[in-house]
Image (cartoon, rainbow, N blue to C red):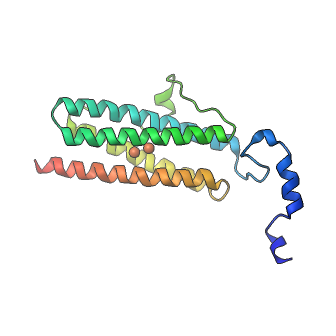
Amino acid sequence: MKSQEFLTDIQTLRRRAREHIERGAVTSGYAADRETVIKLLNEALATELVCVLRYKRHHFMAAGINADSVATEFSEHAAEEQVHADQIAARIVQLGGEPNFSPDGLATRSHAEYVEGGSLAEMIREDLVAERVAIDSYREMINYIGADDSTTRRMLEEILAKEEEHAEDLVTLMAGMEKH
Ligand SMILES: [Fe+2]
Ligand SMILES: [Fe+2]
């Protein structure tokens, strides 16, 4: 009987699962505010897409000025931001929403900015600023979701860890630049 205090009985679980089956992964036990989570995820998607574009620009510009190791780093970050964008878009669909890939208003929906940067040092600095924006916004989203949607939360935690790695990479690049 003790388990009944915090677990739903099998009959109720089975009955609930049959209700609204068209909602797929979103069951009646989904505790988060689905609309808000989808809205937040679309802002994160815009952020990742803007980061892909900025890192791509920086990759090709750095390659043009013979900064090959930095160019390679930018390219790797661009690819990882694209992975994040894909993960977020897939989760939005799983929650019954629609991922917003529209170029109209992309820069406004994004938390991070698209700054071209004139020199290699400026590119690195702007990328670092954008990563720090992403880190704070992911942390806020994770705190907001709390225990209400553990799948979204786990995805955001993995992305956050990667953004922290990116920021660390950029600090290392910045330190390397200052030595020269
Ligand atoms: Fe990312
Ligand atoms: Fe990043």
Farthest residue to the left: give it: 180
Q: Nearer the viewer, residue 139 or 165?
A: 165
Residue 64 location (% of width, % of height): 19, 29
Q: Residue furthest top?
A: 104
Residue 8 makes an appearance in the image: yes
State the residue at coordinates (49%, 47%). 137
Q: Please indicate whether residue 17 sits to the left or right of residue 65 in the image.
A: right
Residue positioned 71% across, 46% down in the render: 25
Q: Is residue 96 above or below residue 170?
A: above
* Foreground residue among 122 and 161: 161
Tell which of 12 and 148 is nearer to you: 12
- Left or right of 12 on screen, residue 118: left
Q: Horizontally, is 138 left or right of 124 in the view? A: right
The quadrant of the rendering that contains the N terminus is bottom right
Q: Can residue 114 be seen by looking at this rendering?
A: no
Number of labelled discs? 0
Is 73 in front, or is 179? 73
Q: Which quarter of the frame holds ligand 1?
A: top left
x, y percentage for residue 24?
74, 42
Where does the image place residue 32, in percent across and percent down from the top left?
70, 50
Q: Is residue 4 above or below residue 167?
A: below
Left or right for 92, reference 55: right
Q: Position of residue 110 (x, y in %)?
A: 48, 35
- Residue sitting at 84 percent across and 57 percent down? 13
From what the image shows, is residue 42 above or below residue 156?
A: above
Q: Which residue sits at x=76%, y=41%? A: 23
